[in-house]
Image (spheres, rainbow, N blue to C red):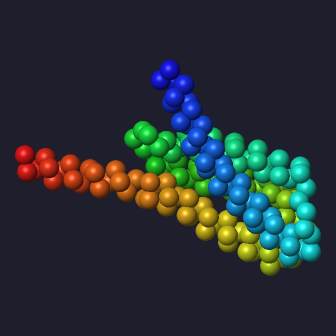
Amino acid sequence: MKKFVLFYRWGMEVKYNMGLYFAGLVFMKAISDAVAGRFAMDTLILVEMFAVTMLFSMVESGLFPRHREQKNLTRNTVIWVCLAHVSFPGVAVAGKWFAPTANWMYAVLLITFELSLLAMWFGFHVALKWDTHCLNEKLKEYQEKA
């Protein structure tokens, strides 16, 4: 039963991140298409986006485990950034997710992508770990008094 619960929790965490990435891609695709005067999305592109975000989130969960001590943070962050650039802009170009669109829109898409990666990293390593940091500080204070 414990293994099932751990697997289920892992799946919930992966789906949450996948949903964030997928929603971001769909939103940027909608903006890109609107700029180009299109107001419908190709189902195949949506399926590709779904698959890429799911696979990326699964690998990401291995690089940044939430309920275990983080080891090799610098190495894993470099791998994560490289994988993100292959997975999202790389597959977007290969799959022509945002083509054709205005050249300036590609710059907007890339800047948005980089800012989104930064926000996710901040979320993983600062915001989600803040409670643990605060509890550890309180524990140190308590241990010093005892």
Q: Nearer the viewer, residue 125 or 135?
A: 135
Q: Is residue 10 above or below residue 77?
A: above
* Res 34 seen here: yes
- Looking at the image, the residue that sits furthest to the left is 146
What residue do we see at 44% from left, 40% from top? Answer: 67
What residue do we see at 15% from left, 53% from top? Answer: 141
**Is 76 displayed left or right of 89 in the figure?**
left
- Looking at the image, the residue that sits furthest to the bottom is 104
What residue do we see at 70% from left, 48% from top? Answer: 53
Q: Give the x, y percent position of residue 139.
A: 20, 48
Q: Nearer the viewer, residue 128 or 83?
A: 128
Q: Nearer the viewer, residue 94 or 100?
A: 100
**Is 83 displayed left or right of 99 in the figure?**
left
Picture quarter containing residue 131?
bottom left
- Looking at the image, the residue that sits furthest to the top is 1
Total numbered labels: 0
Picture quarter containing residue 112?
bottom right
Q: Give the x, y percent position of residue 91.
A: 79, 53
Q: Give the x, y percent position of residue 16.
A: 61, 48
**Is 66 displayed left or right of 23 in the figure?**
left
Q: Give the x, y percent position of residue 34.
A: 86, 73
What residue do we see at 67% from left, 65% from top? Answer: 113
* Res 59 seen here: no
